[in-house]
Every structure is written in C-alpha cells, then in structure tokens.
Image: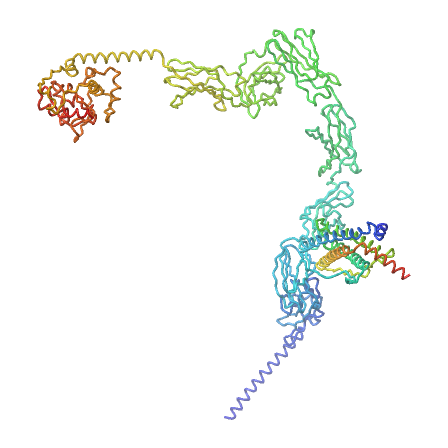
C-alpha cells in the first residue's frame, strides 16, 4: 500500500490512477448509498426532505483550500460518517431490526463494507499529500447522541445515511477535481514546507 | 284595642322566640350528632388524607388514607372520585370502604385513553356518608411541560391487535399543527387543545415491524412515535414425555407465526427455567423421572400477555424411545437374517420393549414385531435368497405403550444365494410336436445367475429310458417330437452356482389335448383382460391351469396357475393385442396329465374391421342377385362378426337391405330387383357397429325369355291391329274408295271457256307438276298424331319433305282414311278471316271435285261452310272438310264444277 502511494507521489502511472480510482470508489459508494436511502425511505415511509441536518463536523469548503486540505476535509468527514454508520447499523439492528435479511439489509451491509475502502483510499492520498507523517483526523469529538425513542432513532439513522450519501458525493467531486499533478506538486510543496520548517 | 294589639304582638313574639328556640335546639342536637359521627355542619369531617397520585404509562394510581375521624363510622364509607383531563371531568368513580377497611390505605386505578404527556390529568375525591360529603381533594399528575419541539406520545408502545390506541401530537408555541397519520392504519383525529391533537387508531392488524404515528406541522416539520401491534401468546397443547428417563421433553403448538421483533418475542419457561428452543415449540429439561404423576407447566410471556400451559403425566408411562444404535446383521442366511442393535440409553435395558423391523426389498415393505426386555436383536424370516434388503428398527415400551420411537438408520443386507426355485413348466401339443415351455425365472426366483436348464423326458411306462438335453439359459422352451400314442413325463430343472433347482415335472397325455371333445365358447375381454370362471372339477387335485395363445399366427403360449380353491381368474398379459383373437384353455391339474376342461375364444378388445374386407362376386338369377364373398380369414377379423348386411341401391337412390345373423354366411341375395344398375354393399355386423364395407356395382340384364315374350306380344299386337285394320278397310272398302279415290268426272268445258281465257278472270287449270305435287302433299292432313301446329308462310316446304320418304309422295290420297283419322279439334275456325287460304296454296281443282261425293256432303261442317279459313296455311284448305264447306258447293251441289273466285285469283298468287 505504501508502495502504491509512493508511486502515486512520484508521478508514475499509478500517481494518476490513485485519485481516479478513489473517485470511482466514491462514486460507487454514492450510488449504493443513494439506493440504500431510497430503500430506507420506502421502508419507513419517509419523504426526502425529512431530517435534513448535518451531523459531520468539518471545516467549510473554500476555494482557498489546497489539495491536502481538501483531502483532509474529505477524509475526516468520511471517518465521521463511518463512525456514525456503524453506530446507526448497530442501533437499528438492536432496536428496530426484525432479523430480516432483505434487500435493504444487504445494501446496508454493502455500504458499510465499502465506506472503509474509500476511507483507506483517501487516507492513502492524504498520506501521499502530506508525506509519511500525515495527521489522521480524529473522530473523538463526534457526538453520538443516539435517540432513545424509536421514531427519533429512525430519523437519526436516516440522517446518518444522508450524511454518508452527501459525503460520498462530495468525495467523488473532490477526488475527480484532484489532478494527480497537483498532488505531486503539493507533495513537493509540502515537503518543501516541512523542510523549511525544519 | 292597643292592649289587644300588644297582646297579639306579645303572642307573636313568643311564637317567634319559641321557633328560634326549637331551631337552636335542633341545630344543637344535630351538632351533637355530627360530632359523634365525625361530621359537622353538613360537611363531613371524615375524608381522605395523604392522597398521592402516580401514573404508570397511561394508568393513574391514586392512594389515600382515611381521616382519623372516620374511625367512629361503623357502617362504612364511600369515596367519590372524579378524573379530569385538561380540567374537564372525563370519568367518575367510587370506592366503597367497609368498616373493616376504615383506617387502612386505599388505592384506585384508572387507565386513561390519553397518555399523561398529552394533557393534564388530575383526580379529585371526597368521602360520602349519610348524604354528607367531605370537601373535594384534588391531586394532579406531575405537570406536562410544553415541549420545545413538536412531539408525539406515547412512544414505542406495544399494543394488542384489536385494541384502540390514542396518540397525541403536541405542537410548541409558534408552530401550527397540520396533520397526524399512520401508514397502514386508519385513525380519527381530534383536537384536544390549541396545541394538542389526538389520533385514535383501531389496530386491526399486526404490525410487521414498528409502525409510526407521524405528526406534521404546517411548515413540514415532522415528529413521530413508533408502535407495534401484536398478539399476546397463543400457544397451546402442551405435552410432555421422556426419551432417556432422565429428562422431560415438552412439546406444544406455538400458534401464530413467531414474532420477528426481538422486543415482542415470546419468552418460554418450563418449571421456571428458560427454554432456549421455546419458539420452536419444544423444551427439554433434566429432571428426576419417577413413577408418579406430575404437573408440567410452561409459562409463555410477551409484552402483551402471559400464558400458562399445563400437562399432567407420569413420565415412566411416556417413554419416547430414541433410535436403536449400530443396527447390523449378526447372521445372514439365504432365507433369514439375525439382526442386532444396541441402545444409547442404558435405562432401556430394564424396559419391556416391543420393536418393529421394517424390511424393504425395494418394491414392498414388510414389518415384523418382536418383544423382549431391553430387546437388542431380532430374527427376520421368509426372505428371498440372494436379495438386497434395507432394514431399520424402532421400538416402544411394551407396557404403557406411548408411541413408537425413532427409526434407526437403515442398513443394507444381502441374503445368501440358493438353488433356483422350481420352474413353472407348461406344454402345448400340436400333432407329434410337443413344446415344453417354462417361465423365465424372476430375479427373486433364480437366487443367483442361472447357468442352463436341463430337460429330460421319458415314456411314463419306461421311466428308466429317459432322454435329456441341456438348454441354454437364453432359451425357455424346447420342442420335442413325441409319439402321440404314448404318455410322457417331462422334467425340467435349472442350474445356478448353488446347484440344480427342484425338478418340475409335467405329464404329456397320450392323445392330443387339442383334439378333445371340448366345445369352445365365446368370451369377451374387458379392460384389457379376460375374466374366466369355471365349475369345480373333480379331476383337479393340484389346482387349475389356464393357458392362452392367439388363434392365428405363432402360438407363443402363456399360462397361469390357479390354486385349487379358486375357480375364477382374471388374465392380464403384456402380450395381449387389441383386435386379435385368443384361444384360452382351462385345464385341471392332476397327478397325471392335465385335463382340458373348457375352451374359450375371444378378443381382449375388439377393433374396427377395415373397409373393403370382402372379395365380392355376384350372380344374377332373374330379378335376384346373389352377392357372395370368400370366408373372412381370422387374421382380418379384428372383431367378432355376428352377421352380415347386404345393402343395395338402385339409380333412384332407394336403399334396401337383406341381412343374416350367421357369421359363417358367405352370400346374401337381393330379390325382386328391377332392370337397372345397382350398388351392392356388404358390411359385417360387429359389436362395434358395421364395418368392413365393400361395394360392387351391378348392371342387371333383362332375362332372355322376357325378351322373347315381349317380342311375341309386340308381334301379336301388330298382327291384331293389322287384322282389324284390314277387316275394317275391307268392310268399308267402298267408302274408302269413294273417299280416297273418287271417280273423277270428266270436266264439261265449253270451248269458249277453254279457248278464250282472256274473257275470264279465271285462268285455265295451271297444271304445273310441281305445284300439283305441292298441293297434293296432303298426308299431313291425315297425320292424326301430329298436333295442329300453325304453319306459317313458306314453312310449308320442309314439312312436305319430311313425308316424301315414306312414300306418300304422289299417292297420298289412297292412304288417307279421312273417316277415321281426320282431326277436327285442331282446326278451329276463326271468324272474320277470309274464308280461304290466301297464300301459297293452290286449291286443287280435282280435290274440290270431291264435293260431289255423296258422303262428303253429309259431313259438311257449318263453320267451314261459312267460308272461314282454318289457319293461314293454305295447306289446311285442302282438308276434305274445308273442301266441303264452301257455300257455293252447297247451293249448287250438282254442279259438276264450282268455281270460286279464289280459284280465279290463284294465278295472281302464283305470279308473286
């Protein structure tokens, strides 16, 4: 994995394909998550505009953000999404689950399994952008105030899915706009900055 | 006056004073009384104290004590209660407190239809005694605070299907309620207050999972509460038993489908211990099994209810045995096997057991029963040698049998081989050829692979001089040439690896059985088989044999043996063919040769005989035709022929028939036929209808004598007519002569007349030969058979020609018989027309002279005398009648010649 990151940074063929691959993965996750949302909506008879409230806390987007910051923002958001999703799935199973294994449950499992892969990819890109000593975003501060009553739990789960959906889409767009050359240059810049710091 | 007034006033005052006094006394006495009973001034002092109001879910629980003053009350109290929701009374109740209960803590429960969060609930109470009430004492539930956000109550409720549930939506200040709804349920909305709305649902069906009551504001904000509608436990039919005499196994019917939601899933306990597999309807627990009846209780609970199921049983009488273990054959013989097994439950060894051994040979199953204490072995008999069996065992307690235990695993066992069973041998004799046949041994009869067969035969008188031959295993018959005058004994054996089978012997009788004096009767098959029955034969000592083979073609005979006690059988054979005639023979099996008892012939199923069955011939005899055919060969008779019908049809289409019921008939005769062309169709009469139709066309010739007869009659008739004609002619000769050939008087002519034609308008006689001939062509007039046809204009000529060949030409008058033949009817006069023909006709002067004849005068017709023409053909004018009809002639009958102006005009006509 590290080798792949190195190649990416060094401007080999892999350096161009890593963000693209991550973008494709994010796109796929977005697609799966959209389907999951649709299934959940259908299952719980929710309308689309229900529970529109952000749960993930990251710096706001800005044109001033460089590649590393953009990657960091995405990576951090996805990490929070993962934490939320895991909790949501567990609570749903525990409180609302009927032990069924239908289409919804399968899709939920798929999204839950695919999200770490995207996190891994963005993490690698972040590492590549920052060098070996990358700063892993923390999710310790994430508030996981899971509602105690079932209806609010459903709304909460729905919000989590929406959040995953939103961030997978954002990741897709960000990663697509992330030219490998910039990554490389950014890596150099970072290195230069760090060496200057030193 | 004043005094009296004063007296009256004093009296009134004293009365008032007295009244006041009485009232005070009464009040005083009442006060005293009320003080004694704990009440005073109409307000009961005895009342509730230490009142608390709590709630559990939607149930309000009110508790209170009696005031100490109540202790004096001896005959009990009544507490009146009132529930208020949002300060409106919604329910009234009362609690009766007996004297014994006075002083204790009282409680009262009431379940509200609204959750306590939805509206303020309060309860007030007071005591009542002797129409005295204590003051109301009100208690309110801990206050409901207005939520900051839209909220729905109650939350996460589990409700019973069939019940009603009310949910409320509380909308905070500044927001407006829009609607409340639940997917899958119908509800009734009700406004409780400005900010509280309720929705009452009738829960008619079970929720699949959690359903949501959703409340929506006008701005689209939503909130909700989930609920589940389900059923309380519905398990039934608990039954407990033991398998190992160390534990109890209970089973029951779980009823409705088990809930999927974990929270509402039923929980099972057997005698207070949880059952892991309770949702499957079974539970097992270790217990000490003793010979005593016990109660076995299963408790089922879920959030909606609790259920207890009971069963009372002595487990020693309810032993459901486990399957025997390690089942195997201890001894294997050709026809029996010893089976053994063991028990995994040691306690079974003391039980008196009954065991079933299920023996399957692939096609059928047989079960044998064995008994014994702690049974672990069984002998299985009557098995087929060299045969594969599947065997399994199960057991139950012989004493207090409860139910059969589980079947053991099936074991495959093959019995040892043995010699082949005795062969089933039969024979068929045809002249000096005797076919010895035996049935192909079935696999359960051969007991091993057959090598070959050995056939030996000898005269019964000379048993020592036997012949023998080996027949390969692929052959199952042998044809012997035996002396029909001798009785033979034939023996057949089969050899396999285990040796030779028991010999099968058959005696071939001296005389051919087929030639015996047994009549053949008819038999009809049904459902592809023959049902045969016969009377008991005293000859039969070892049963009966029925054999059969087709009547024509190769007789590959088949047979079956019938036990002695039966005199009927149904014969099925895969070789039976529809539309084929079979001969069935019934023999008595004896110590010696078989004795033929009966013979039957018939079809298993008749089929329609094909058309053109017959080869037809015919023979005409006078007006009869005999249609014959060749006898129908049996192979063509696919159905039994009961007779024949001969249909015949002439040209007119009329159909006649003759028939016969004789199936042996080979001809039928159609009689009284006309000389015409006939179609003869012969058809065979069968049970399935008419078939085999064959037709021929026959042209019938008139018979020779009839021709002769006709000729003679014709000749006779001609002769007779001629004779009569001759006689008539002879007798009327003079008349005929006068009429036909009258003497022509010599015309008396003056010279002037002859020589000065110019002086007369009449021309001299124009004796043109051709004209004459034309005019004399009169035979047409005498053709009495010809209808009177108007002959128009010049069409006269062809008519003339038609007659000339017959020799009428130039001699017509001689042949005419005007007396007899002259037609008159067709010659109707037509008034107004010229009296004579005008065109193309030459009046014949000589003809006109006929008028001088005597007869002709008498026959003159008045119409014609009027001089009316008959038709426009001048030909008509030449008829004798017309000739006689002229007025001039009548006026001057003696005139040797009469001249008619018409004659004079003739030349003009001819000049035309």
Give the answer, above or below, for where B358 lies relative to B20.
Answer: above
Q: Kindly indicate the quadrant of the structure image that contains residue B860.
A: top left
Q: Quadrant of residue B182?
A: bottom right
The answer to whether residue B681 shows anywhere in this view is yes
Residue B901 placement (x, y as % from top left): 13, 26
**Residue B241, horizontal then vertical, whole percent:** 73, 42
Which residue occupies the foreground of this view, B452 or B409? B452
Instruction: Name which residue lies at 63% across and 53% down.
Output: B205
Q: Is residue B561 left or right of residue A116?
A: left
Among the 4 quarters of the image, the one containing residue A138: bottom right
Q: Position of residue B443 (x, y in %)?
A: 70, 23
Does residue B297 sit above or below B787 in this rendering? below
Q: Nearer the viewer, residue B587 or A55?
A: A55
Query: Quick one: which residue is furthest to the bottom in this view?
Result: B2
- Examine the rendered structure and indicate whether residue A64 appears above or below residue B379: below
Q: Depth check: give the residue in front, B835 or A118.
A: B835
Q: Position of residue B610 (x, y in %)?
A: 51, 21
Q: Is residue B620 left or right of residue B229?
A: left
Position of the C terminus of chain B, as image quadrant, is top left
B507 left or right of B371? left
């Amino acid at each position: 994995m590290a080798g792949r990151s190195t190649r990416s940074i060094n401007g080999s063929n892999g350096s161009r394909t890593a963000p693209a691959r991550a973008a494709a993965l994010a796109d796929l996750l977005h697609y799966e998550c959209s389907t999951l949302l649709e299934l959940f909506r259908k299952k719980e008879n929710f309308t689309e505009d229900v529970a529109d409230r952000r749960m993930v806390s990251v710096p706001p987007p800005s044109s001033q953000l460089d590649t590393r910051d953009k990657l960091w923002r995405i990576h951090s958001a996805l990490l929070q999404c993962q934490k939320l999703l895991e909790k949501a799935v567990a609570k749903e199973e525990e409180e609302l689950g009927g032990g069924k294994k239908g289409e919804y449950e399968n899709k939920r499992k798929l999204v839950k399994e695919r999200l770490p892969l995207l996190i891994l990819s963005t993490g690698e890109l972040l590492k590549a952008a920052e060098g070996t000593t990358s700063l892993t975003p923390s999710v310790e501060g994430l508030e996981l105030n899971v509602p105690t009553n079932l209806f609010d739990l459903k709304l909460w789960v729905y919000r989590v899915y929406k959040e995953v959906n939103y961030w997978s889409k954002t990741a897709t767009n960000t990663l697509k706009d992330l030219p490998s050359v910039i990554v490389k240059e950014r890596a150099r810049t970072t290195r230069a900055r760090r060496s200057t710091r030193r | 006056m004043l005094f009296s007034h004063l007296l009256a006033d004093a009296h009134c005052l004293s009365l008032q004073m007295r009244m006041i006094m009485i009232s005070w006394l009464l009040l005083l006495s009442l006060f005293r009384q009320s003080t004694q009973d704990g009440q005073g001034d109409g307000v009961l002092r005895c009342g509730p104290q230490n009142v608390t109001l709590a709630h559990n879910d939607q149930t309000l629980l009110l508790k209170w004590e009696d005031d100490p003053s109540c202790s004096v009350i001896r005959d009990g109290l009544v507490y009146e209660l009132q529930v208020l929701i949002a300060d409106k009374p919604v329910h009234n109740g009362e609690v009766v407190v007996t004297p014994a209960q006075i002083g204790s803590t009282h409680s009262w429960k009431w379940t509200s239809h609204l959750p306590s969060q939805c509206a303020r609930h309060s309860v007030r109470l007071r005591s009542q005694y002797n129409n005295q009430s204590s003051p109301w004492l009100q208690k309110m539930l801990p206050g409901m605070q207005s939520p900051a956000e839209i909220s729905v109550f109650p939350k996460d409720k589990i409700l019973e299907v069939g019940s009603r549930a009310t949910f409320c939506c509380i909308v905070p200040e500044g927001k407006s309620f829009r609607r409340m709804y639940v997917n899958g349920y119908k509800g009734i909305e009700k406004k409780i207050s400005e900010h509280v709305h309720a929705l009452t649902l009738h829960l008619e069906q079970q929720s699949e999972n959690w359903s949501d009551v959703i409340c929506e504001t006008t701005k689209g904000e939503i909130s909700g509460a989930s609920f589940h509608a389900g059923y309380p436990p519905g398990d039934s039919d608990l039954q407990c038993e033991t398998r190992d005499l160390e534990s109890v196994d209970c089973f029951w019917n779980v009823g409705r489908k088990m809930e999927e939601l974990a929270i509402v899933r039923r929980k099972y306990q057997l005698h207070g211990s949880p059952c892991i597999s309770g949702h499957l309807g079974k539970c097992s627990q270790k217990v000490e099994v003793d010979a005593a009846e016990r109660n076995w209780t299963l408790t089922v609970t879920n959030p909606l209810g609790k259920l207890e199921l009971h069963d009372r049983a002595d487990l020693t009488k309810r032993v459901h045995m486990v399957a025997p273990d390690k089942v195997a054959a201890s001894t294997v013989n050709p026809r029996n096997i010893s089976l053994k097994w063991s028990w995994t439950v040691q306690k079974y060894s003391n039980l008196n057991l009954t065991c079933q051994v299920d023996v399957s040979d692939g096609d059928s199953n047989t079960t044998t029963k064995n008994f014994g204490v702690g049974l672990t072995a069984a002998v299985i008999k009557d098995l087929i040698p060299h045969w594969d069996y599947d065997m399994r065992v199960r057991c139950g307690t012989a004493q207090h049998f409860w139910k059969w235990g589980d079947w053991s695993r099936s074991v495959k066992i093959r019995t040892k081989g043995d010699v082949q069973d005795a062969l089933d041998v039969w024979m068929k004799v045809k002249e000096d050829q005797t076919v010895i046949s035996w049935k192909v041994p079935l696999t359960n009869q051969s007991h091993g692979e057959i090598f070959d067969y050995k056939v030996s035969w000898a005269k019964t008188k000379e048993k020592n001089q036997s012949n023998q031959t080996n027949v390969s295993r692929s052959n199952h018959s042998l044809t012997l040439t035996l002396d029909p005058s001798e009785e033979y004994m034939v023996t057949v054996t089969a050899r396999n690896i285990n040796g030779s089978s028991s010999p099968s012997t058959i005696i071939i009788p001296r005389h051919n059985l087929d030639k015996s004096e047994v009549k053949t009767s008819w038999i009809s098959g049904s459902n592809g088989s023959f049902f045969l029955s016969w009377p008991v034969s005293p000859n039969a000592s070892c049963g009966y044999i029925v054999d059969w083979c087709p009547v024509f073609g190769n007789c590959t005979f088949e047979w079956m043996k019938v036990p002695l006690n039966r005199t009927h059988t149904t014969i099925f054979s895969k070789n039976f063919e529809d539309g084929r005639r079979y001969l069935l023979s019934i023999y008595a099996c004896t110590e010696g040769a078989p004795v033929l008892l009966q013979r039957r012939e018939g079809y298993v199923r008749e089929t329609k005989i094909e058309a053109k069955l017959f080869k037809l011939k015919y023979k005409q005899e006078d007006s009869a035709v005999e249609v014959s055919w060749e006898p129908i060969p049996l192979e063509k008779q696919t159905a039994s022929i009961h007779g024949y019908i001969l249909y015949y049809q002439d040209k007119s289409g009329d159909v006649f028939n003759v028939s016969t019921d004789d199936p042996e008939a080979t001809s039928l005769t159609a009689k009284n036929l006309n000389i015409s062309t006939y179609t003869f169709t012969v058809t065979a009469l069968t049970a399935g209808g008419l078939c085999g139709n064959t037709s021929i066309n026959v042209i019938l010739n008139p018979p020779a004598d009839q021709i002769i007869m006709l000729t003679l009659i014709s000749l006779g008739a001609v002769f007779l007519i001629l004779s009569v004609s001759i006689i008539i002619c002879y007798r009327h000769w003079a008349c005929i002569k006068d009429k036909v050939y009258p003497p022509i008087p010599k015309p008396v002519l003056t010279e002037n007349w002859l020589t000065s034609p110019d002086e007369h308008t009449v021309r001299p006689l124009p004796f043109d030969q051709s004209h004459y001939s034309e005019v004399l062509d009169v035979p047409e007039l005498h053709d009495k058979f010809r209808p009177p046809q108007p002959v128009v204009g010049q069409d006269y000529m062809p008519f003339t020609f038609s007659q000339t060949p017959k020799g009428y030409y130039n001699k017509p008058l001689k042949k005419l018989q005007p007396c007899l033949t002259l037609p008159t009817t067709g010659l109707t006069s037509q008034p107004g027309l010229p009296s004579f023909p005008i065109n193309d006709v030459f009046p014949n002067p000589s003809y006109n002279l006929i008028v001088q004849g005597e007869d002709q005068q008498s026959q003159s017709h008045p119409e014609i005398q009027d001089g009316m023409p008959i038709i426009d053909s001048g030909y008509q004018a030449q008829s004798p009648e017309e000739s006689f009809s002229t007025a001039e002639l009548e006026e001057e009958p003696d005139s040797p010649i009469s001249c008619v102006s018409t004659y004079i005009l003739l030349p003009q006509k001819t000049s035309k």
